[in-house]
Image: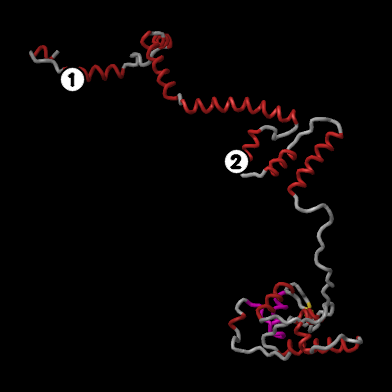
Amino acid sequence: MQNVMNGRQSNKSLMRAITRMSRWIDTRRPRHLTPEQRASIREHPEYVEAARRLDEQAETCIYDPKRALRQKVRKEFDCKQANIDIDRQLSGAAIDDEEAKNVLRTDSMQPEQIDLLEKLLTWPTSHSLEAEWRRRNAAVAAISQCCCHLEGGPLRGRRKRPAPSNEPDEEHMAMEGRTTKIASISPKISKEQLLLENAGNYIRKAKKTRRCFQCYGNNLLSVHHRTHKYSEYKSTLRHFQEKHLEDRRCHMCNEDLLHEMHLRRHAEDVHRLTTEHNYYTKEESVSDIDTD
C-alpha cells in the first residue's frame, strides 16, 4: 500500500517472502493428499502408462539369458537323471549304461576296476536268498581279479623273542667281563652285591651324581634299575623331578620327610642333587667324581 501511495513499484520479492511465511505458519494449509486423491492419481492414464514402462524396464534389467538357460538345462537334467536313477535301482546295478562307464574311463580307470565297481555297487532286486548269494559271488569274483594274494592265514612274521629280564646291561657286563653262563646262584648274588656297593659309594662321593638315590634305596626295584647311571647330571635331575617329588621318605637314608620342600632340601644337602632352577650356577667348575 505504501508503494501505491508513494507512486513506487511494489517489492515483489519481499511480498513473496512474506506471503510464503504466512502460508507456512497457517495450520489450515493442506500438506498431504487424502487417500481419495491418491487413488484418483493411480487411475490416471498417464500414471498407469508410466508405471507400465517402469515395470518393463525393470524386467529387462533383471532378465539374464545365460542364467535362464542354465536354470532350464539344470531342470531338464534333474528330471532326466531321476528317471535314470530309478531305472538303475530297478535293474540292480549302479553302473549299467555306457555313459557312466565313459565317465569312469575319462578318470583313467582300468577295465578291471570298472568291472569291480559295477559288481560292488549293486542293489538287491529280489527277496530270495539265492539271488543274494549270486550277487555276493559276483562281487567276490570281481575282487579276486584285482587281488594278487590267495585266501589264507597271515604271512609268517618274526620269531618269538624272550621277554626282557632284569639282567645287568652292557655297562655291568663290561665290568664283570666276558664270562660264560653262571653255573650256580651264589656267584650271581655276590656280583649283584658288588654292583650295589659300587653304586652306593658313587652316590655318596659324587659331587654331581648321575645315579638316583631314591631308586637305589628302593629294594622293590631290580638291580638294573637301582644301579642305573644316566649320561649326565641334568638327566638325573629331570628323572628325580618327574618321579620322586611326591615321595615323603628317603629310601637310601630311611628318613621320613614332611613335605616337598623338605625333600628338596634333603636331596641338596645330603645327596648333592639341586632341584632349584638355577642349579647350573652353583659350582659349575667342580668335576664329577666317578668311582665305577
| Quadrant of residue 250 within the rendered picture | bottom right
Task: Please provide the residue range marked out in magenta.
Answer: 260-276
Q: Mark 2 belongs to which amino acid?
A: Thr
Q: Residues within 10 Å of mark 1 (few under 14, many from 20)?
A: few
Quadrant of the drawing holding the C terminus: bottom right
Residue 175, percent across and down?
Answer: 77, 89
- Label 1 and label 2: CA atoms lie apart by 86 Å
Q: Which secondary structure lies at badge 2?
A: helix
Q: Which secondary structure lies at badge 1?
A: helix
Residues at marks 1 and 2 touching, judged by CB atoms closer than 8 Å? no
Left or right side of 162 for 9: left
Identify residue for label 1: 13
Q: Between residue 165 and residue 222, name the one nearer to us.
A: 165
Q: Is residue 16 above or below residue 220?
A: above
Work out whether mark 1 precedes mark 2 in sequence or the reverse, and give the earlier one.
1
Q: Mark 1 belongs to which amino acid?
A: Ser
Identify residue for label 2: 106
Residue 7, percent across and down?
Answer: 7, 13
Left or right side of 17 for 114: right
User: Which residue is painted at 38% across and 13% down in the image?
Assistant: 33
The label nearer to you, 1 versus 2, is 2
Q: Could one spot residue 80 in this view of the protein?
A: yes
Q: Between residue 186 and residue 6, name the one nearer to us.
A: 186
Q: Between residue 271 and residue 179, name the one nearer to us.
A: 179
